[in-house]
Image (tube, grey):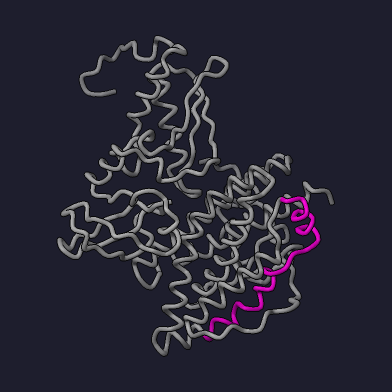
Amino acid sequence: MNNKTDLIEYLLRLGDSALIQGQRLCQWCGKAPALEEELALMNVGLDLVGQARNWLEYAAELLDDGRDADDLAFRRDERAYRNLLLVEQPNGDYAVTILKQFLYDAWHLQVLSGLSQSSDERIAGIAAKAVKEVTYHLRRSGEWVERLGDGTDESHQRMLAAIPEVWRFTVELTSADDSEQRLCNAGITPDVAHVATAWQAKVSEIFASASLPVPPAPSYFYLNARRGLHSEHLGILLAEMQALTRAYPDATW
Amino acid sequence: MQPGELIASDQGARPAQPTDLAAAWATLAQVMDPEVPVVSVVDLGIVRDLDWQAGHLHVVVTPTYSGCPATEVIESDIRDALELAGFKAPQLERKLTPAWTTDWITDSGRERLRAYGIAPPDGSTSKRSLLGESPVIACPQCGSAHTEVLSEFGSTACKALYRCCDCREPFDYFKCI
């Protein structure tokens, strides 16, 4: 694999993760538990979808096969998506939604901070913009983890129940494959060990003030989103997300 | 078309010249943000640069937030305004670096935001606001500093929702970024 293929895979991973997380957040639209949270969820989702567009536009240019960012977002099949397994998990109750968001945000911020120093100018530009938005995302999700974890008996129980729903998927956040290692050696992406350490520190810090136990670090998981092997939830999400585009393939906005 | 305007008009008939850059800036100073129609795209620092390239006006714009839904509308408004002013087929370049920051909002832009009822971004983008300290914001209605934040995300991604504890009115705060 040459560097360009590695780069495309990495851009898809960033873009798809933001896109799928944005789609999950949309699913709360009209049903969020509080008005202020409704606004927050939709705004965070909008930021993520906007970032996804930036990543997918760059990926489409590198692929150079006639597809644009919309084609990549709405016309690929499940096996072609490279998003993190974490973000495709269902929203569950609000505890699961918040926990998922926090774990993703903590990783996302570290990755974007590292990418702001990328030797690839385009990546550095997109990341430098996104990192400011994601700083606000992490602040909000971290505060909510604290509020729910250290809240009432019920909110604390729900947070405890939420952890095993998502924890095993976090193994992807703290590991890299050969392709990503090559990009790191070329100065394009940040060092995964550094991202992992910072992520673990943030999670420990917030969990401590939320009175939540940090589970042992997850080890091998049999699915591999880097090779398009997703959980059963992605297919269902894509069916809904792509229904309109596939029903009217020639539609223009 | 505005009421009273002549149907036949020579507006746009005289092609603009390279010496008309000042006129281009003046034109863009009249292109308002679609969401907050009291500040122009120049006030907001969205238009970064204007110059002539190969006989066409070249406009460098920068999107505010990654997911701002008004980005395309703003670009199309810029294009329309320039065409109407005689600048044929302006070339718009969307530049991501350096990233847009509220530091680029002009003082007059901030005043117009305040008059409209939106508290302008607090000073410059010191890391403080991004690292977890909610700034103390004066109420744009009554001026009181006795305000509290209700949500970090308001009616749009760029604004937070505050409430004045004195006059009891809620208001939007344009977040520092």
Q: Nearer the viewer, residue B103 or A239?
A: B103
Q: Which secondary structure class fits the magenta region best?
A: helix
What residue is at 51 percent from the left and 44 percent from the top? B99
Q: Quadrant of residue A77?
A: bottom right
Is residue A237 shown left or right of residue B175? right
- Bounds of the magenta span? A160-187
What percent of the width, then of the height, locates residue B153? 38, 60
What residue is at 73 percent from the left and 79 percent from the top? A219
Q: State how many labels appear.
A: 0
Q: Quadrant of residue B163?
A: bottom left
What residue is at 66 percent from the left and 49 percent from the top? A118
Which residue of the protein is positioned furthest toward the bottom in this rendering? A153
What percent of the width, then of the height, locates residue A240? 56, 61
Q: Nearer the viewer, residue A119 or A53?
A: A119
What residue is at 73 percent from the left and 54 percent from the top? A9
Q: Nearer the viewer, residue B138 or A42?
A: B138
